[in-house]
Amino acid sequence: MTDEKRVALITGGARGIGKAIASRLARDGMNVAICDLLEDAMRETKVELESLGSDTATFSCDVTDLDRVSEMVAGVEEHYGRLDVLVNNAGITNDKLLMRMSGDDWGKVLSVNLTSVFNCTKSVIRGMLSNRWGRIISISSVIGLMGNAGQANYAASKAGIIGFSKSVAREVASRGVTVNVITPGYIETPMTRDLPEKAKQQLFDMIPMKRLGTPEDVANAVAYLASDDAGYITGQILNVNGGIYM
Ligand SMILES: NC(=O)c1ccc[n+]([C@@H]2O[C@H](COP(=O)([O-])OP(=O)(O)OC[C@H]3O[C@@H](n4cnc5c(N)ncnc54)[C@H](O)[C@@H]3O)[C@@H](O)[C@H]2O)c1
């Protein structure tokens, strides 16, 4: 254990699951930096995180841009003098059947959901390796394991995170850096709130726990993987899905 506060960077941390993760890690005693494109939401979240005792730096950074991400990580390291935990959480959907999916529909989702994970992980890895301690946790999805009609782009991006993470986990394991993936099922956020009632009911019928997950359910899993207790766990997929996929 270290005496100084650990520092976590959460991408897409302004709202939804990312915000719940940021709050949980702040409550666990970390200083939490967030990046997002939603400046107003990010400002509000910063105030909430500071009320939990976190020194919170915010970065208006598009995670698809490697140069901007690398500047952001340098900014985090300069502000806090360290960066211990990266949570790759930013993500989007753009659902269409393959017949209707354009190259742009494909490319944008792959870029925000998967290339961002490369950009952020590559930018933090050197510092973590030299500290001989680090946690990289990426938010994939049950859809990356099961597939889903209308989500070929999203499923491919989320499955890609898994192969990427297992590979990097092997590269850095001997230096105290763990790389893991969380695959949430259906979680109540702006992404799922607009589902029609009928679709929600169909979902409940499929979920053994008969409820959607909460952002806090995902945050609890991140908190564990980010902790010292999870130091011997790497290259793993942790399903947080109420049993919808086992
Ligand atoms: N909601 C669900 O049911 C569910 C299920 C499984 C996985 N997930 C995954 O969890 C993560 C968070 O999802 P959420 O439901 O909280 O969504 P959300 O839309 O509420 O939050 C995503 C955040 O990422 C930010 N973001 C998007 N593109 C960005 C970019 N280019 N650069 C920086 N920030 C960007 C958004 O502004 C937003 O604040 C996503 O990766 C999503 O795929 C969600």
Image (cartoon, rainbow, N blue to C red):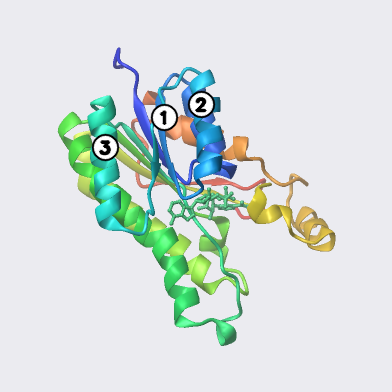
Other residues around mark 2 within 10 Å, as few (<14) / some (14–19) / many (≥20): many
Q: Mark 1–mark 3 contact, CB under 8 Å?
A: no
Other residues around mark 1 within 10 Å, as few (<14) / some (14–19) / many (≥20): many
- Left or right position of 190 against 144: right
Q: Secondary structure at mark 3?
A: helix
Horizontal and vertical percent for residue 9?
38, 37
**Kind of residue sitting beneath label 2:** Leu
User: Residue at 79% across / 62% down in the picture?
Assistant: 199
Q: Is residue 168 visible?
A: no
User: Residue at 36% across / 56% down in the picture?
Assistant: 116
Q: Which residue is situated farthest in the front direction here?
A: 40
Other residues around mark 3 within 10 Å, as few (<14) / some (14–19) / many (≥20): some
Measured in 3D between alpha carbons, the distance from the residue under mark 3 to the one under mark 2, in whole angstroms, is: 19 Å
**Kind of residue sitting beneath label 3:** Gly
Query: According to the image, label 1 marks what residue?
Result: 32
Query: According to the image, label 3 marks what residue?
Result: 75
Horizontal and vertical percent for residue 177?
27, 37
Tag 3 or tag 1, which sits nearer the N-term?
Answer: 1
Tag 2 or tag 3, which sits nearer the N-term?
Answer: 2
Q: In front: 21, or 166?
A: 21
Instruction: Decide if ligand 1 comes within 8 Å of the CB at mark 3.
Output: no
Measured in 3D between alpha carbons, the distance from the residue under mark 2 to the one under mark 1, in whole angstroms, is: 8 Å
User: Residue at 24% across / 55% down in the picture?
Assistant: 67
Q: Which mark is residue 222?
A: none
Asked where in the image residue 118 lies, by quadrant, the reply is bottom left
